[in-house]
Amino acid sequence: MKHLYAPWRSVYLMSEVDAIDGCLFCVLPDENDDRKNMILERGDNWYVIVNKYPYTTGHIMLTCNRHLDRFTDLDEGERADLPPMMSRCERALDEAYHPHGINVGVNLGRSAGAGVEGHLHIHLVPRWDGDTNFMSTVGGTRVVSEDLNDTFERLKKALESLPPEA
């Protein structure tokens, strides 16, 4: 049997999710520690956060500032701000990682696979040709090749390089 060693990941793999009282996506921005909480950018109605349990390197989430769980609950401003924020996320991922594609997904409710129920958030997952290999298909394991702090820094720099209207 062959072994794949990635000892730097042990801290990530062994850590437990901090006990949070309330909704994760409401509590983190209220803490006002964007670096610690991996919040990349804040808009009037949405903020961008690095997924701490990424599917691939660069996996981010666009999260509504207001606690709501469905697109039908968005107000006019939230609906208007969504496309420009999605565009910024796409452009930042393109600049930082040059992926071959990006999966965009939303899980509305537990039955749909929502890990954080009740707070609308949109996943943007960079993809590359051949990024699904034996580790995920046979071993049921994902290998994320970049430390989350490095992901944060790379995407923060990419977002800061974009003009505000982008």
Image (spheres, rainbow, N blue to C red):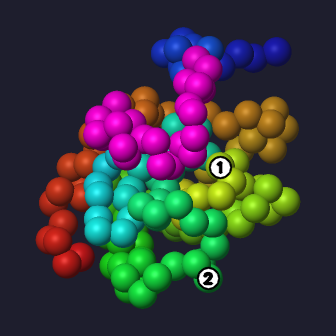
User: Which residue is located at x 46 percent, y 82 percent?
Assistant: 75
Q: Does residue 132 appear in this view?
A: no
Query: Could you tell me how far apart the alpha carbons at marks 1 and 2 are, in whole angstroms?
Result: 18 Å
Q: Residue farthest to the front? A: 21
Q: Nearer the viewer, mark 1 or mark 2?
A: 2
In the rendered image, the quadrant that contains the C terminus is bottom left
Could you tell me which residue is drawn at 42 percent across and 33 percent down?
A: 148
x, y percent for residue 54: 57, 43
Res 121 quadrant in image:
bottom right
For image coordinates 57% across by 66% down, the residue present is: 68
First in sequence, mark 1 or 2: give its number. 2
Q: Amino acid at mark 2?
A: Thr
Q: Is residue 97 above or below residue 28?
A: below
Who is closer to the viewer here, 104 or 47?
A: 47
Image point (36%, 69%), residue name: 45
Question: Would you name the residue on which mark 2 appears?
Answer: 72
The residue to which callout 1 is attached is 116
Where is residue 141? Give x, y as percent. Answer: 73, 34
On screen, residue 86 above or below 115: below
